[in-house]
Amino acid sequence: GRPSPLDNDGLRAALEDEPSSSTRELASVFGVSSHQTVLNHLHQIDFTHNKPRQDPHKLTEAQAQRRAEVCHQLLENPLDDRFWKRIVTSDEKWVFLVNHNRQKQWIPRGQNLASVPRQDRFGKK
C-alpha cells in the first residue's frame, strides 16, 4: 500500500509532551486525514488509552499499611456481622467546586499511571 505520512517516533515524542492528546488532535498535528490511522499506529507501537486510578486520598506509608491490615482481617473473617451492621448508607450527591483533572492518557502497555487523590469531601461545594 501507500506509505503512511505518520512517523512512529514522532508520535511517541508527541505523546511524551502531551499524553492526554486525542487521536483527532494528533491527526491534525501530523496532517493525517483520518484519526483511525493514528489509532492504528498507536496500537502498533503498543500504546493504551487509560485513566489514572483515583485513590480515596493521599495516604502516608503507615496509613496504607494499616488499611491493608484491616482489609486482611475483614477477609479472614467474612462471617462476622458486627462490622457490616455498623455501616450506614445514605442517598446524597456531592458536587465539588474544584474538580481534579482525570483525563485519559496514552501510555505504553504495562506502564502504570500515577494515581490521583480523591476530592476532599469537606471542601467547598
Image (tube, helix red, strand yellow):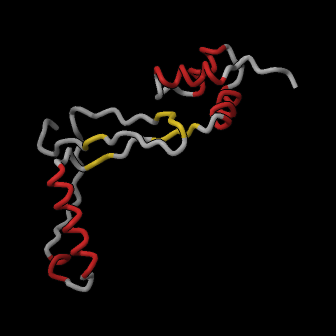
**Is residue 24 rendered to the left or right of residue 53?**
right
- Residue for point 51% across, 34% down: 106
Residue 20: x and y, percent?
46, 28
- Where 32 sits versus 40, above or below? above
**Is residue 37 rendered to the left or right of residue 14?**
right
User: 47 or 55, which is in the foreground?
Assistant: 47
- Residue for point 25% across, 44% down: 118
- The mark total stands at 0
Task: Quadrant for the N terminus, please.
Answer: top right
- Residue for point 67% across, 13% down: 31
- Residue occupying the far bottom of the picture: 79
Residue 45 in which image quadrant? top right
Residue 52: x and y, percent?
39, 41
- Where 19 sits versus 82, above or below? above
Residue 87: x and y, percent?
17, 70
User: 111 or 41, which is in the foreground?
Assistant: 111
- Residue for point 59% across, 21% down: 26
Residue 71 in which image quadrant? bottom left
User: 50 or 97, which is in the foreground?
Assistant: 50
**Is residue 57 rendered to the left or right of residue 48?**
left
- Where 61 sits versus 101, above or below? below
Residue 21: x and y, percent?
50, 25
Task: Quadrant for the C terminus, please.
Answer: top left
Residue 2 in which image quadrant? top right
